[in-house]
């Protein structure tokens, strides 16, 4: 799965559209918030001719990324609020923020989704889509680890997938880098530390799994 992941990068997510009679490329572009040339490029078209009944790939901005950035900027989070970033996997092949949120709520977490962010794998949310959890919007502590300190001061990021069996997709990893970039520029102080669930003392878990690129990310995000 990981090895043959799509080559699309996080800002080139597409949806499929079936061309209707009378559609023109420029109208479609306007309706979907993109440009005719972006649609041509996504579909390898040489000109603006489209044929009713055919399917078109329409480029869409990964809504989660944009959402995250604007939500976070508006929150004006104090730089000393968060000291850790903790990566997790869902340990399930699929899922999204709403699905995990309901689950966590049923397990007694009144604030719902235990993570602050969920990065989708293309099944129940976009491949590389970053979903913002309610705890991030309200700047509440997480419920993603046992350690009270890491819940209080740690930003929990969950990658959808079971990385005991598969690898994260390329889009998930590049979205994670974008998320980290924005967190570093708008939220985190200079002394934050990045870690993964299993490396927190006393957690007794394999999360985020043996195929998660723990070493590579640790070396990139360890100051
Ligand atoms: Zn975990």
Image: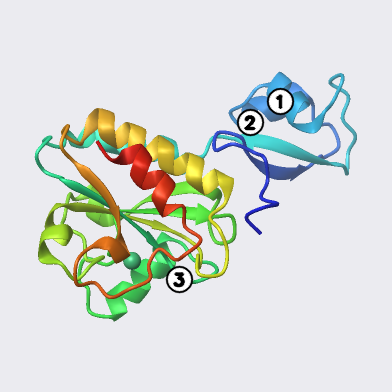
Where's the N terminus, which quadrant? bottom right
Q: Position of residue 144 (x, y in %)?
A: 26, 65
The residue mark sitting in front, 1 or 3, is 3
Q: Residue at x 22, y 79 (%)?
A: 108
Where does residue 223 sit, x and y in percent of width and height? 24, 36
Question: Disc 2 vs disc 3: Cβ atoms closer than 8 Å?
Answer: no
Classify residue 54 by image quadrant: top right
As measured in the structure, the alpha-carbon distance from the residue carrying label 2 to the one carrying label 3 is: 38 Å
Q: Is residue 188 above or below residue 133?
A: above
Q: Are marks 1 and 3 in contact (CB under 8 Å)?
A: no
The dot on residue 27 is: 1
Is residue 113 among the parts visible in the rendering? no
Q: Is residue 24 left or right of residue 140?
A: right
Instruction: Say which mark, if any, is on residue 120.
Output: none
- Residue 65 appearing in the image: yes
Q: Position of residue 148 (x, y in %)?
A: 11, 65
Marks 1/2 in contact by CB < 8 Å: the verdict is yes
Say which mark, if any, is on residue 91: 3
Q: Is residue 30 above or below residue 177?
A: above
According to the image, label 2 marks what residue? 31
Q: Secondary structure at mark 3?
A: loop
Q: Quadrant of ligand 1?
A: bottom left
């Amino acid at each position: 799965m990981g090895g043959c992941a799509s080559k699309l990068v996080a800002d080139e997510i597409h949806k499929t559209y079936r061309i209707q009679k009378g559609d023109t490329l420029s109208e479609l572009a306007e309706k979907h918030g993109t440009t005719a040339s972006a649609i041509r490029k996504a579909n390898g078209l040489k000109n603006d001719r489209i044929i009713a009944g055919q399917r078109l790939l329409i480029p869409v901005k990964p809504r989660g990324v944009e959402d995250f950035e604007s939500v976070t900027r508006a929150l004006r989070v104090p730089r000393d609020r968060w000291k850790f970033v903790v990566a997790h996997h869902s340990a399930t092949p699929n899922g999204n923020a709403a699905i995990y949120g309901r689950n966590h709520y049923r397990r007694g977490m009144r604030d719902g989704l235990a993570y602050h962010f969920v990065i989708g794998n293309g099944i129940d949310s976009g491949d590389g889509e970053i979903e913002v959890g309610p705890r991030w919007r309200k700047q509440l502590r997480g419920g993603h680890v046992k350690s009270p300190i890491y819940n209080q001061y740690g930003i929990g990021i969950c990658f959808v997938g079971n990385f005991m069996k598969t690898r994260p997709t390329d889009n998930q990893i590049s979205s994670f880098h974008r998320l980290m970039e924005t967190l570093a520029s708008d939220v985190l102080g200079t002394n934050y530390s990045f870690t993964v669930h299993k490396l927190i003392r006393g957690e007794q878990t394999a999360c985020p799994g043996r195929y998660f690129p723990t070493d590579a990310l640790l070396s990139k995000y360890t100051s």
